[in-house]
């Protein structure tokens, strides 16, 4: 290691990989640091501290971070005084490997160490210090009292639950994020009110199994009842619910409130009962279908998406066909489809050998994507002629003459800027749909 001397700078750049909870955690780190005089750097070049907030869910996510770290070595060579930190789930899981493969990293900290970030950065400033490591998990840490540093915007996240207790056999999350705990309703409402006061119109409540939320006597439906009362917040979303914790009370609460969006991301993982059991998902495909039917009966126009893993250990052609059949039956509006990735330490990695060859996994994934794309295209096409309510996000990336935003049911919608009327992010408009791709609705503003 070069002798880096004093490193007094206080501009921080945070790069985020992975899920929305990581994006929210990055805002939390920004908040912790801002109370100690740090400011956000506009880019890497102007940063004194670069933090890479990481994901461990699949091997590919981790390989991308290692690739990124070797790229950042250039920064360290050019400006050795820059502090480079790796934070989050992959830091929790691979602390030693990171310091071996990227010995120039100054800081490695897990998801429960963010409160200590300023002190840990100070430790990094010691001359010739070894990498500072803090990967202690903390059953009680909910980051209560810390205000995340949110950029000015219209749509943001509030973490309502940390950790996970489900221990699906494929999943690393409980190992890297620790035990499940709910944030207090008071804290959540404070954050929602704070966002509303700053012009936010939409909040997404986050948790690994968000609907198993519990804090003293408050369950997730109770929490939603309180969040919809926050004045100024026009839309409430949440992700990701766990199927067996989806209560009739929660369905009724969603149906009752217009502010709760008609969109649900409900991870299925597999359509095979044998695979679901091996995954320890706690439901059968039939129970999942029944839940979907109950939700659709209560909220007829609800859109749904899901997560599927193909190539789980021992997945036969029949198991796979059952997953295809489940997608055909349910007809999700879209789906995130993943190839199984073995994660060290999980039950599946210890007990269920990953025997399927890459070619079979690849073929199954490709044909599932193709099938889902066709379903999505049909669903999006069917929206032609309907009118959707859109919250304007801003100019379309493709064409500055167009605006874009999401419909209540989470479909990206693109439409020409109206003449003689300036629309701002956060404004709501009705858009009549005239065309569609498998991922986007196209239309024009109508009055109303
Ligand atoms: N608790 C969250 C899961 C977070 S991980 C939830 O239930 O939504 C997001 C998705 O990644 C999971 O739903 C699953 O489909 C996928 N995933 C998790 N572990 C995986 C693994 N080992 N290999 C492939 N995909 C995985």
Image (cartoon, grey):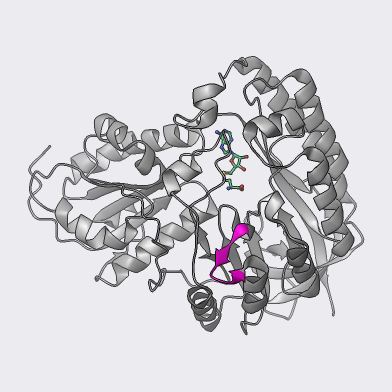
Asked if one can make out residue 339 in the rendered structure from this viewpoint, the answer is yes
Specify the segment rendered in magenta: 212-218
Position of the N terminus by quadrant: top left
In the depicted view, which residue is nearer to us: 49 or 333?
A: 333
* Residue 214 is covered by the magenta coloring: yes
Image-based side of 274 in relation to 203, left or right: right
Report x, y in % for residue 141: 39, 61
**Depicted 380 relative to depicted 77: above or below:** below
Image-based side of 238 in relation to 368, left or right: left
Report x, y in % for residue 58: 51, 34
Report x, y in % for residue 434: 87, 58
Report x, y in % for residue 407: 75, 64
Q: On the rendering, which quadrant does ligand 1 occupy?
A: top right
In the depicted view, which residue is nearer to us: 446 or 135?
A: 135
Which residue appears at 53% of the width and 23% of the height?
Answer: 351
Asked if one can make out residue 408 in the rendered structure from this viewpoint, the answer is no
Which residue appears at 72% of the width and 75% of the height?
Answer: 428
Image-based side of 85 in relation to 1, left or right: right
């Amino acid at each position: 290691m070069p002798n880096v001397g004093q490193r007094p700078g206080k501009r921080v750049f945070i790069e985020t990989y992975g899920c929305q909870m990581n994006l929210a955690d990055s805002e939390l780190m920004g908040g912790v640091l801002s109370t100690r005089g740090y400011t956000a750097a506009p880019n890497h070049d102007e940063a004194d501290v670069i933090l890479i907030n990481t994901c461990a869910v699949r091997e590919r996510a981790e390989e991308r971070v290692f690739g990124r770290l070797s790229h950042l070595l250039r920064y360290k060579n050019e400006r050795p005084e820059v502090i480079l930190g790796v934070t989050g789930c992959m830091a929790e899981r691979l602390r030693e490997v990171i310091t071996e493969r990227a010995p120039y990293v100054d800081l490695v900290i897990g998801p429960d160490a963010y409160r200590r970030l300023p002190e840990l950065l100070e430790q990094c400033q010691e001359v010739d210090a070894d990498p500072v490591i803090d990967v202690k998990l903390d059953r009680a840490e909910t980051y209560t009292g810390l205000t995340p540093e949110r950029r000015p915007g219209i749509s943001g996240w509030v973490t309502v639950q940390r950790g996970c207790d489900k221990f699906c056999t494929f999943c690393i999350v409980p190992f890297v994020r620790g035990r499940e705990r709910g944030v207090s309703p008071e804290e959540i409402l404070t954050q929602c009110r704070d966002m509303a006061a700053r012009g936010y119109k939409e909040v997404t409540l986050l948790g690994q199994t968000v609907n198993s939320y519990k804090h003293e006597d408050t369950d997730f439906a109770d929490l939603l009842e309180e969040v919809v009362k926050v004045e100024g917040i026009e839309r409430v979303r949440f992700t990701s619910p766990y199927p067996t914790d989806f209560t009739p009370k929660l369905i009724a609460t969603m149906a009752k409130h217009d502010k709760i969006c008609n969109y649900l991301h409900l991870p299925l993982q597999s359509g095979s009962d044998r695979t679901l059991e091996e995954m320890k998902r706690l439901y059968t495909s039939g129970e999942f279908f029944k839940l979907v039917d109950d939700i659709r009966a209560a909220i007829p126009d609800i859109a749904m998406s899901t997560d599927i893993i193909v190539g789980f250990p021992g997945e036969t052609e029949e198991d796979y066909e059952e997953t295809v059949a489940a997608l055909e039956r349910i007809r999700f509006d879209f789906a995130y489809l993943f190839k199984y990735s073995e994660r060290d330490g999980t039950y599946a990695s210890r007990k269920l050998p990953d025997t399927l060859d890459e070619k079979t996994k690849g073929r199954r994934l490709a044909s599932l994507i193709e099938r889902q794309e066709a379903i999505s295209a049909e669903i999006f096409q069917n929206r032609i002629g309907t009118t959707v309510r859109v919250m304007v996000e801003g100019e379309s990336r493709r064409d500055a003459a167009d605006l874009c935003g999401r419909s209540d049911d989470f479909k990206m919608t693109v439409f020409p800027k109206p003449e003689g009327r300036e629309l701002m992010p956060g404004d709501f408009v009705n858009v009549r749909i005239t065309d569609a791709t498998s991922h986007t609705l196209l239309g024009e503003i109508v009055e109303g």
